[in-house]
């Protein structure tokens, strides 16, 4: 797998709409949009009020493919490259899970706020879309062991850099719907105006166009994006709690959950996630980030 991190960031920001169109028609999988309301915490649509039955491991194996939701516009974790292929840290993990299960991957591009819905409606078997574990989400889906650590970060123009949340009072902060950034700022910074977008590409375009004063999402992502976009800097590198990122399956799907947990433990023995980091994230972060600040091996913190 060839990873073109720097070019991917610029392509995603400059041609976000084109990439989203490309992924919707690509042979590698369909696209799942977000619910129409702007509420936080991955709101589910009415179509998934009653969970569709999850597929068993045997059914997945017999079909020859596992359906996995990933991001298509969140480089370097999940994105579509210039050739229309899924790439990134989460995608490398997805490919290994499928290989060990003896099947191919059918990818579904997912927006942040739709990650719960694609599981409860049984559109996918597994979500590997940089999914931060929260108590509220854990009421709706089952999380496997973690494979990453994360906090929030804030990126802003260098000539008007935001270095403290208090500087955002009365200003506009760009966020993606259904993310932990949305939840944190709604709870802790009521004087900040939130400008919400369904897709990360649209959120970054808004920042580039000057439609907001800053953008907040996972610190791992904004650090990478700022390195690929001159004139922007991450003034707040660590905000909120230290959280974990983990795969998610439909609530009660113990068979698939057990398989994923066993895989994470096994992969930890071969240092898989550090190798994944070296392949997909190190070209972005260089020596500015300690891999151990991000990577979780074997599901053990």
Image (tube, rainbow, N blue to C red):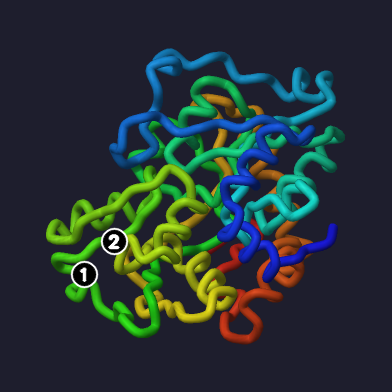
Q: Please tell me whether mark 2 sits on a helix, a strand or a loop.
A: strand
Q: Which residue is drawn at the image coordinates 43% and 80% (left, top)?
A: 233
Q: Is residue 118 left or right of residue 242?
A: right
Instruction: Answer whether labels 2 and 1 touch (C-beta < 8 Å).
Output: yes
Give the labeled residue for mark 1: 168
* Sequence-earlier tag: 2 or 1: 1
User: Residue 76 appears at what percent x and percent y?
Assistant: 63, 62
Q: Which residue is drawn at the image coordinates 20% and 65% (left, top)?
A: 171
Name the residue furthest front. Answer: 209
**Label disc, if present, on residue 16 of the rendered structure:** none
Q: Residues within 10 Å of mark 2 (few under 14, many from 20)?
A: many
Q: Which residue is drawn at the image coordinates 57% and 14% (left, top)?
A: 53
In this rendering, the answer to whether 140 lies above or below 270 is above
The image quarter containing residue 241 is bottom left
Kindly report the distance in space between the C-alpha atoms of the residues bearing marks 2 and 1.
7 Å
In this rendering, the answer to whether 82 lies above or below 249 is below
User: Residue 62 appears at what percent x and percent y?
Assistant: 83, 19
Q: Does any portion of residue 258 appear in the rendered image?
A: no
The image quarter containing residue 161 is bottom left
Number of numbered discs: 2
Give the labeled residue for mark 2: 173
């Amino acid at each position: 797998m060839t990873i073109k991190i720097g070019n991917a960031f610029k392509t995603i920001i400059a041609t976000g709409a084109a990439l989203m169109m490309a992924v919707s028609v690509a042979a590698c999988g369909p696209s799942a949009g977000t619910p129409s309301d702007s509420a936080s915490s991955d709101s589910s649509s009415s179509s998934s009020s009653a969970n569709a039955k999850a597929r068993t491991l045997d059914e997945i194996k017999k079909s020859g493919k596992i359906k996995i939701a990933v991001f298509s516009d969140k480089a370097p974790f999940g994105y579509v490259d210039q050739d229309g292929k899924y790439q990134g840290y989460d995608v490398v993990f997805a490919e290994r899970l499928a290989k060990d299960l003896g099947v191919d991957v059918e990818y579904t591009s997912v927006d942040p706020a739709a990650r719960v819905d694609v599981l409860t409606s049984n559109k996918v078997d597994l979500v590997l879309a940089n999914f931060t574990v929260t108590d509220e989400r854990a009421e709706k889906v089952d999380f496997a062991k973690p494979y990453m650590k994360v906090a929030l970060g804030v990126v802003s123009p260098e000539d008007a850099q935001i270095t403290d949340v208090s500087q955002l009072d009365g200003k506009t902060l760009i966020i993606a719907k259904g993310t932990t950034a949305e939840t944190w700022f709604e709870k802790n910074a009521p004087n900040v105006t939130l400008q919400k977008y369904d897709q990360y590409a649209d959120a970054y375009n808004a920042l580039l166009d000057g439609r907001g004063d800053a953008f907040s999402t996972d610190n791992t992502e904004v650090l990478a994006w700022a390195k690929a976009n001159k004139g922007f800097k991450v003034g707040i590198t660590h905000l909120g709690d230290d959280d974990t990122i983990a795969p998610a399956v439909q609530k009660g799907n113990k068979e698939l959950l057990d398989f994923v947990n066993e895989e994470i433990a096994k992969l930890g023995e071969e240092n898989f996630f550090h190798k994944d980091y070296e392949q997909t994230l190190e070209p972005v972060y260089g020596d500015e980030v300690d891999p151990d600040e991000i990577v979780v091996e074997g599901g053990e913190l």
